[in-house]
Amino acid sequence: MSLTVALSKGKLLAGSEALFRRAGLPFPNGDGRKLVVPAGELRFLLVKDMDVPTYVEYGVADCGVAGKDVLLETGADVLEPLDLGFGRCRVVVASPVGRAFAPDRAATTRVASKYAKLAAAHFLDRGLGVEVVRLAGSVEIAPGLGLADCIVDVVETGRTLAENGLEEVETVAESSARLVVNRASFHARRAEVQDLVARLQEASR
Amino acid sequence: MTSRLTQVPPGAQCFVGEEARQRRRIEETVVSVFEGWDYEEIIPPLFDYADVFAVEALASKTYSFVARDGSLLALRPDFTSLVAKVAAGRLLEREAPLRLYYSGEVVRYEPVRAGQKSELHQMGLEHLGGEARAADAEVVAIAAECLERLGVSGFVLALGHVGVFGGLVEAAGLAPERVLALRDRIESKDPAGVRQVLQGTGVSSVAAAAIERLTTLSGGLEALDPALEAFSSCAKARAALDELRTVAHALDAAGLGRHLAVDLGEVRGLDYYTGLVFRVFAPDLGFEVGSGGRYDTLVARFGRPLPAVGFMLGLDRVALLLERQGRVAPIPRRSPESVAASELGAGMAEAVARRARGARIRFGNGGWR
């Protein structure tokens, strides 16, 4: 039986493809409608980025490519043997320009984020009892509309923030794409998994 | 409110008919292996004082409640503490080694995900006292026999030793909160994360490299040799590896080598385990089927210094695994003889008589006079 690899359909897909091709590994071709795609000696699952760790944790996929930001948010119990080096970004706190987050007003501060768990931990760990509003997307418009005072979101270039009148206040976490592996597969399918890890490691150098 | 009468709390379990029969069969198989190695059954209490279960890893998961006299009680979140208490209490006079097994349910506050449930059935044993390496090997061999007899294919017993990590960390002189962060990253086999935690701690680059190697040193028994080389400068780590090697070689000599793996990134439960640790994996199940390890300080908490080693298999996980591997054959029920008579007294007499002969009967068809 071939190994199953879970991939994010989102921003990490292009980087994953480049890496797999560099490693001489098969990769699903084009047709974006198929979500379970056998390719060569591997089988691929194309899922939402937040779901990659879940498929791997349950062992439905043996391996996967997930952003560190997503791993921190989901808290999935998976192995992370490789930093693949692409998809670099940062999870940051951003506030409207000139209205930086004030710790002394934490009790009345609302923070909007897709990363609700990460955002809560970031503030609560420092004793700041903010209210976290979970959103599924378009987080950067929340402060302008009065839904939140600041946001916790991912930035690559900072352009989206600037367009929405926001500026970065502090970094919550650094992120990049990681190879994740299911705990049982790591041992029960050792030879195949180790071969895949070695080839991806070589190609990500 | 009425909906509470039909709802099920998340994580609660119920089994009926065929499912229940399959679980009984699994339990019987495992218990027969435990008995075969001369372990005695212990049926510990369902609840005890919360202090008994005060192991850090379980503290946040324990269902506790206040007794009428104001003392804090808890439903058992595991068996090991209870067995330790009994070994140090009413079995105090009994000479070591003590070999005890249990099979029953524990409850834990546990988010329902990837094999975690609030109510779970554990089948396990504890080997208290005796010669340590022999006991370690015995316990792993019993785990292997259980899986073999259950018909699990391709299972792997991943062996580690917390003393390797413990020795390296002690030598590096790291602060406790760093050790926790480090343990978490090693447990995830995340070398990049390990480097990040060690950044700016002043740990020498040689020591840092050795700690990072814990994330990659795993594989077959052959992984022990590079490990001995990598950690040769740390006496405690080397001693731990020697212990691990002794146990692994004994199991290999018994023909279990093909089921063994070495995993030095196995560092969970460090506040509890003191030596060998192992986890059981198999293809088709994404999470461990069972786990075990050596805990030399736990029993002393109860007043009897007694080194010990134990392991447990999760019945729920074994059942799921066997189903996934297509190893579940239906257990046929004998079809019952119908007992009917026109008058209830005569019918009852007939039923009792047939039961005395051992028949499986179905009593009654209504319409008694």
Image (cartoon, grey):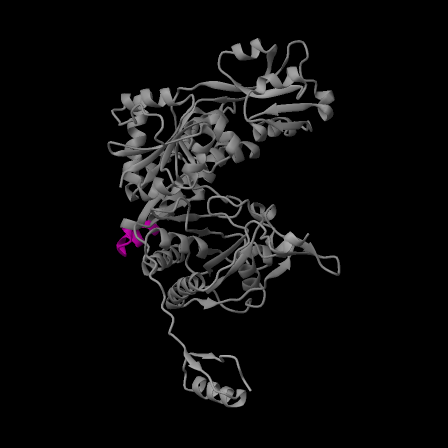
What residue lies at 57% left-to-right and 9% top-to-bottom? A162
Q: Which residues are magenta?
A: B247-257
What residue lies at 36% left-to-right and 68% top-to-bottom? B332
B274 relative to B303, above or below: above
**Which secondary structure class fits the magenta region best?**
helix
Residue in the foreground of this view, choosing between B9 and B61? B9
Q: Position of residue B256 (x, y in %)?
A: 29, 53
Which quadrant of the view contains residue B72?
bottom right
State which quarter of the image contains the C terminus of chain B.
bottom right
Residue in the foreground of this view, choosing between A47 and B347? B347
Residue B76 appears anywhere in the view = yes
Residue in the foreground of this view, choosing between B82 and B11? B11
B146 relative to B169, above or below: below
Q: Position of residue B210 (x, y in %)?
A: 40, 31
Label tally:
0
Does the segment drawn in magenta span residue B353? Answer: no
Residue in the foreground of this view, choosing between B302 and A72? A72
Q: Position of residue B194 (x, y in %)?
A: 45, 29
B243 relative to B329, above or below: above
B167 relative to A146, above or below: below
Q: Position of residue B162 (x, y in %)?
A: 45, 43
Residue B175 appears anywhere in the view = no
Which quadrant of the view contains residue A14?
top left
Tell whether A109 sits left or right of B262. Answer: right
Query: Can you name the residue that lies furthest to the right here?
Result: B69
What residue lies at 64% left-to-right and 23% top-to-bottom? A111
Does the segment drawn in magenta span residue B256? Answer: yes
